RNA sequence: GGGCCAUUAGCUCAAGUGGUAGAGCAGUGGAUUCUUAAUCCAUUGGCUCCUGGUUCGAGUCCAGGAUGGCCCA
């Protein structure tokens, strides 16, 4: 006979729903768990035999994760606390129900809080209620659940068996709340724009295809919210933001999941330089919130957010990388043999250097560089191949102990189809990407609000498509019409929220900050 | 996409060069009841990821596949 059947014999439902919580129980439990973690406060509790008739009873409810002698360890969202459950302190009925307890069951105990002989808190149970049955045993109490695949597939077990994992997800929520609060205070309006798009725009990426039956319409899941948010600037919402899911039909890795969370905000009458200042303030504010509440997650960092954040033109970063090759932690590179710092400004010399370098690159880098047709595309490719991998070695705190955040600015226009051209040099745009700890976290620019220029950029994207770039954008005629109605001068900002959580919470893989990362379905 | 590694009981892990598949915890039955991975006695539990091959004999060797991890791209 199963335990569930034996419970029924005692008149107890295995899955009851009769005991209900209320604000008083919730607060009582929370205070109790906090008290259990406070050694000094526990020392003031009475021993069992010092109790008086009027000692107040407190509730403790949650999942039983361990049995030790006459003690049950009960796990709650706030932490663990234990209960001393002795049959002779319980009614016969409660004692009989207690005998049918399995690890992982949900239970309620009520009784006075006491100090044990070892100085710990325990709820000395006068009442014991079975609240919910578990049929499967929990993972080994000492080792927990370690199997990485199982942790992702059975996240529900991971979360209750490994409290440190649950902590990361609580921290994630705090980070998102903190981002919202920061933007709300600055007068940004949070909005929701469509996830189903008819054409691809706002980023260069491969989309997921889907279909709407009633309209018989081929649709894609959005690869970025950008173009809808900028339509709202035209509509008169001067400061808007959206935090939401975005989908890119690409590979899965420690840094990529097909669906991820993006923050984008747009600010009228501002430039990309204003956004650099705002970005520093925002990330520092979020980090301060995080460190105050989750100090255990934020130690031992390889980067310093309090240091001065560097601002480096993309071409300067390439020059600096060449000049510092072999110094400190910046490795030597064959690029120094083919590309002189002076040649970075000279499109012919730069192209020749790229050609000379081609046979020395690995297959993927060759593809990336050979694909380039213009100087701007080559500058971007060389930045990615040469400078980006060593940003953490190049930009460090004065004592050299930590890397500092760096804004890479002045991108070539060809790789920036939605960004405003620089007034002094039309070949480059007013754009930056933020790198912290060597990882690309943000992309932002002064917005292109010249509808004629934007139309030319879309045409350029179509030419890229024609020559085989299957990530190029579509021509968005409605967006051109929107710009033609007049978009205020503005700057916009995008941030990978999952990557920010990884960075601030010291998590090595994006799967560690996604509750349910995409996995292949299990075999039958 | 390429390379390397892993896959054995519910969980965590063992099984020199091929020779009867094991432990701890969980579970079950009992004892004990101020424990801190509770303890003590007894005990159940296996398609060793899958499919083939070599062999008298395969968890172990070989080939192919599956899933996952790490690195590279």
Image: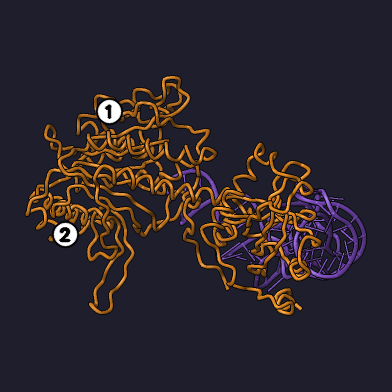
Chain colours: A orange, B purple
Which of the two discs, 2 and 1, labels the residue nearer the N terminus? Answer: 1
The foreground one among A146 and A471 is A146
**Left or right, residue A395 beside residue A294:** left
Query: Where is residue B32 drawn, in percent x and y?
Result: 89, 57
Q: Is residue A210 visible?
A: yes
Query: Where is residue B60 drawn, in percent x and y?
Result: 73, 58
Kindly identify the residue that appears in the image at 47 percent across and 37 percent down.
Answer: A291
The foreground one among A163 and B71 is A163
Q: Is residue A515 above or below residue A176?
A: below
Q: For residue A14, which quarter of the picture? A: bottom right
The foreground one among B11 and A180 is A180
**Left or right, residue B6 beside residue A21:** right
**Left or right, residue A95 beside residue A144:** right
Query: Where is residue A228 drawn, in percent x and y?
Result: 21, 57
Q: Is residue B63 above or below residue A330?
A: below
Circle 2 chain: A
Which corner quadrant holds the N terminus of chain A? bottom right
Circle 1 chain: A
Other-residue count near label 2 (Cα within 10 Å), few / some / many at <14 / 14–19 / ≥20: some
Which secondary structure, mark 2?
loop
Mark 2 — residue?
A476
Q: For residue A438, which quarter of the picture? A: top left
Mark 1 — residue?
A316
Query: Where is residue A501 drawn, in percent x and y?
Result: 44, 45
Kindly identify the residue that appears in the image at 74 percent across and 54 percent down.
Answer: A84
Which corner quadrant holds the C terminus of chain A? bottom right
């Amino acid at each position: 006979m199963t335990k569930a059947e034996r419970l029924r014999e005692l008149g107890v439902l295995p899955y009851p729903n009769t005991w209900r919580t209320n604000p008083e129980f919730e607060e009582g439990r929370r205070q109790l768990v906090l008290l259990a973690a406070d050694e000094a406060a526990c020392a003031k509790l009475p021993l069992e035999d010092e109790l008086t008739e009027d000692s107040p009873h407190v509730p403790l409810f949650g999942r039983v994760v361990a049995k030790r002698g006459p003690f049950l360890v009960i796990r709650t969202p706030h932490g663990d606390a234990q209960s001393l459950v002795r049959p002779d302190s319980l009614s016969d009925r409660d004692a009989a129900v207690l005998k049918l307890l399995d690890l992982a069951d949900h239970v309620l105990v009520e009784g006075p809080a006491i100090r044990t002989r070892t100085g710990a808190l325990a709820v000395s149970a006068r009442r014991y209620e079975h609240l919910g049955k578990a049929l499967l045993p929990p993972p080994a109490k000492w080792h927990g659940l370690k199997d990485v695949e199982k942790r992702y597939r059975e996240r529900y077990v991971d979360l209750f068996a490994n409290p440190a994992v649950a902590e990361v997800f609580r921290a994630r929520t705090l980070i998102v709340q903190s981002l919202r609060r920061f933007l709300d205070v600055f007068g940004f309006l949070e909005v929701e724009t469509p996830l189903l798009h008819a054409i691809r725009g706002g980023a260069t990426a491969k989309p997921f295809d889907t279909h709407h039956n009633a309209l018989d319409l081929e649709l894609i899941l959005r690869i970025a919210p950008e173009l809808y948010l900028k339509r709202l600037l035209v509509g008169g919402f001067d400061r808007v933001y959206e935090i939401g899911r975005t989908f890119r039909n690409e590979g899965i890795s420690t840094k990529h999941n097909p669906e991820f969370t993006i923050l984008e905000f747009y600010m009228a009458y501002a430039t990309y330089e204003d956004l650099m200042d705002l970005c520093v303030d925002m990330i520092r504010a979020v980090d301060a919130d995080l460190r105050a509440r989750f100090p255990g997650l934020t130690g031992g960092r390889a980067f310093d957010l309090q240091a001065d954040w560097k601002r480096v033109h993309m071409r300067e970063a390439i020059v600096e990388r060449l000049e510092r090759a072999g110094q400190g932690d910046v490795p030597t590179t064959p690029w120094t043999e083919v590309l002189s710092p002076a040649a970075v400004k000279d499109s012919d010399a730069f192209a020749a250097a790229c050609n000379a370098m081609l046979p020395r690159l690995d297959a993927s880098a060759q593809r990336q560089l050979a694909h380039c047709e213009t100087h701007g595309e080559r500058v971007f490719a060389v930045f990615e191949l040469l400078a980006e991998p060593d940003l953490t070695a190049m930009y460090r705190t004065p004592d050299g102990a930590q890397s500092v955040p760096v804004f890479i600015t002045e991108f070539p226009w060809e790789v920036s189809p939605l960004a405003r051209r620089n007034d002094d040099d039309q070949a480059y745009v007013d754009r930056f990407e933020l790198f912290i700890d060597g990882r690309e976290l943000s992309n932002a620019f002064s917005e292109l609000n010249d509808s004629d220029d934007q139309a030319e950029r879309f045409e350029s994207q179509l030419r890229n498509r024609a020559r085989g770039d299957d990530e190029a954008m579509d021509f968005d005629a409605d967006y051109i019409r929107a710009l033609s109605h007049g978009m205020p001068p503005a700057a916009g900002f995008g941030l990978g929220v999952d990557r920010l959580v990884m960075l601030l919470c010291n998590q090595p893989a994006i799967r560690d900050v996604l509750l349910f990362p995409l996995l292949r379905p299990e075999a039958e």
